[in-house]
Image (cartoon, rainbow, N blue to C red):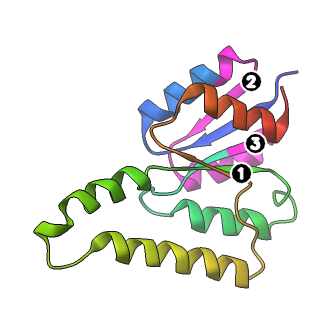
Amino acid sequence: MAKRVLIIDDDQIIVKYLSVALSENGYEPVAASDCNEGLQKIRDNKPDLIVLDIMMPGRSGFVMIKQLKKDEEFKDIPVLMLSGIGGVLDDWETHKAETEEAPYDALRETLKKKIDEMREEGMLSPEMFVEKPVKSDAFIGKVQELIGS
């Protein structure tokens, strides 16, 4: 039986792209467009791996992973987090001379604080991060590293 991978991302292009990559490599992809739908799909499908976007409307991936790691039923499911933040930070860095603030620095500090809070609360960080844009070979390599073929 194929290992099931739940993709939680509000970007449907990313979801389709990752779903095709997973299917072509023998995995069964399941998709959710936000954390609420993702939680329901976790309950219904019992995935072997969760691929979770960080930046989504409503509830962020950070909030979702905290919730999952506190839940006895789901805490052992590995989580691979997707981050498009690198591209945003690069864009902000390019234009920071045009602004009075350095939003790159503020965002980096906010993310660092959030990760530190998760550690202090005893929450484990995700098993891996993957930066967007995702390269399918690298993504599948990380999936295989986490849950095998």
Q: Say which element carries label 1.
A: strand
Contact flag, marks 3 and 2 (Cβ < 8 Å): no
Label of residue 56 in the image = none
Q: Distance between the residues labelled 3 and 1?
A: 6 Å
**Would you place residue 27 above or below residue 8 in this image?**
above
Q: Does the magenta stretch include residue 40?
A: yes
Q: Quadrant of the C terminus?
A: top right
Residue at the spot x=29%, y=72% of the render? 103
Label 3 packing within 10 angstroms: few (<14), some (14-19), many (20+): many
Task: Tell me which label, 2 or 1, sits earlier in the chain.
Answer: 2
Q: Which numbered tag is attached to residue 49?
A: 3
- The residue under the point 66% across, 53% down is 39
Residue 6 spot, x, y in % from top left: 67, 39
Q: Earlier in the sequence, mark 3 or mark 2?
A: 2
Q: Are marks 2 and 1 in contact (CB under 8 Å)?
A: no
Queried whether the magenta region covers residue 76, the answer comes back as: no
**x, y percentage for residue 14?**
47, 34
Kindly identify the amino acid type of the residue bearing the numbered disc 1. Val
> Magenta residues?
22-50
